[in-house]
Amino acid sequence: MSVKSRIPLILLACGSFNPITNMHMRLFELARDHLHQTGLETMAYGISFSCCHNSFRCPSVQRGKRQGRYQVIEGIMSPVNDDYRKKGLVSARHRIAMAKLALETSDWIRVDPWETEQESWTETVKVLRHHYNELQSKKEFMKNKQPTERSTENFLSSQCSALPELKLLCGADFLQTFQTPNLWKKEHIQEILEQFGLVCISRAGSDPAQYINESELLTKFQHNIFLVKEWIQNEISSTQIRYALSRGLSVKYLIPDSVIAYIAYHNIYTEESEQKNEGDLLQPLKLHNTAM
Amino acid sequence: MSVKSRIPLILLACGSFNPITNMHMRLFELARDHLHQTGRYQVIEGIMSPVNDDYRKKGLVSARHRIAMAKLALETSDWIRVDPWETEQESWTETVKVLRHHYNELQSKKEFMKNKQPTERSTENFLSSQCSALPELKLLCGADFLQTFQTPNLWKKEHIQEILEQFGLVCISRAGSDPAQYINESELLTKFQHNIFLVKEWIQNEISSTQIRYALSRGLSVKYLIPDSVIAYIAYHNIYTEESEQKNEGDLLQPLKLHNTAM
């Protein structure tokens, strides 16, 4: 199946990235591979997909979602605002800089500072809406422009009227957080699942299908939750990285050398930095408590 | 304790390195941190020794490539190097002999260095110091390695003893596994447990070379699991394919073949 007839897709990952690790970047690679490969079974059965418009009501596109025949054109890493108040969260300035260094060797993933530039913490659904709006604006702008090298612009300027789909990339633990009281608004979860969709990476041995099964809402939109299995155990937790760094232990080969050098030069992770926001309530919880 | 009064130590890791992964290199870093924290050792060098093609493991690609990939991967390390000696021998070499070889090399260098000026390199600094102690040479391995001592006909008992007694092991295990158990179940291991250093890896990082080869043969990404330079090398030489994975299929591992013949 030609690349042009696939549905263009953009992956967005939200998180602390405190600091970015090889695992964060691996999530993107895994997701892309999965979404690219899930079209093959469909082709084997000879079902043709000439339709490529982005409608939830189109039956052929429904089939496409289940089997997938996507072209992942971009990955966006969106570090959270300092106002999130997570314990040990260092300045966004540093987290953005480290992500930029780490992503230097990637030709499709980039870091976006929008969230960190807002006055306060932004709910995830709003980050998705923002990036989707950006996509739409770019599409309007590109309609009359010449195609260039960049994939995103190629798709946006093509004859096809479909906008890329924007999906939230996450780990299986993310699915679980939907159950944490007061962390999410129900209507937000629904919008994320219905209007956007999730690409959820889980480790061998865990079964996210379980969380989906236990939730009415998740079950309703399961067709828009892509489960990707990570067979290569690669649990590089940022918390463990910070712990090792504050003790002078090596993290080489777990995060890029350029990021290690940056951290050392700016002396970012110390016992002191780990105490930041100690005792504070996470901003989303604070907001919801105030509302009540 | 000052750096000079610590016992100098060299880590040697034997394996297929087919291909080298970030996890292999992480083992060295973990071991060094652990030994430094005991306060007794100064790790001055790490040696990666890829196994000879004659080992006959399924899917083992040419040593030429495995050495080249390890060299690329270790470019950014200032203390770990890859040594081709094993791969240059006519046939597969038993682990204890690899250890003996590198220890002999150490002794020869010591003699040579006695009258030389100290230079930048750590190893030479120690070898040329007034101290008459030779560095200790220890075998770096994963916990699964300890288990292989129990595999029938894979090891000669006297070799296990020599490895433990004359050299020693630095054994990295993952959170959740307990190598102390294997030691406890073996009389020999228990006897020399003072010379087995157990290091816990808290950050789960099980990048298996087998999984890497599998991913590569299917055109899946392994970026961030092995260095970019190694990925480029593999692509350029088209090293890992369905065909390469079939190499030595059905053959007996060389150590098992040798011991069966002896019987």
Image (cartoon, coloured by chain):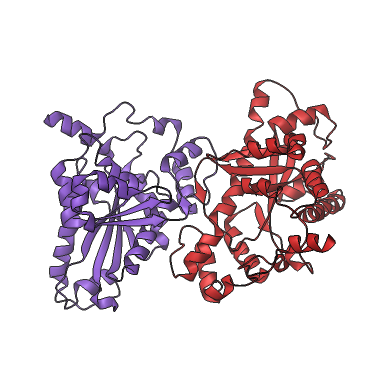
Chain colours: A red, B purple
Horizontal and vertical percent for residue A197? 75, 42
Query: In the picture, which quadrant includes the C terminus of chain B?
Result: top left
Looking at the image, residue A60 sits to the left or right of residue A235; the answer is: right
Residue A258 seen in render: no
**x 49%, y 45%: residue:** A233
Horizontal and vertical percent for residue B210? 42, 39
**x 40%, y 60%: residue:** B75
- Please tell me whether residue A223 is drawn above or below residue B36 in the rendered image: above
- Please tell me whether residue B49 is drawn above or below residue B122 in the rendered image: above
Query: In the picture, which quadrant includes the N terminus of chain B?
Result: bottom left
Looking at the image, residue A137 sits to the left or right of residue A198; the answer is: right
Looking at the image, residue B34 sits to the left or right of residue A187; the answer is: left
Q: How many marks?
A: 0
Which residue in the rendered view is the most extreme toward the front?
A292
Horizontal and vertical percent for residue A89? 63, 67
Looking at the image, residue A141 sits to the left or right of residue A260; the answer is: right
Q: In which quarter of the image is residue B145?
A: top left
- Please tell me whether residue B21 is drawn above or below residue A264 in the rendered image: above
**x 23%, y 73%: residue:** B126
Q: Quadrant of residue A62?
A: top right
Horizontal and vertical percent for residue B64? 33, 45
Which residue in the rendered view is the most extreme toward the top?
A45
Residue A127 seen in render: yes
Q: Quadrant of residue A213?
A: top right
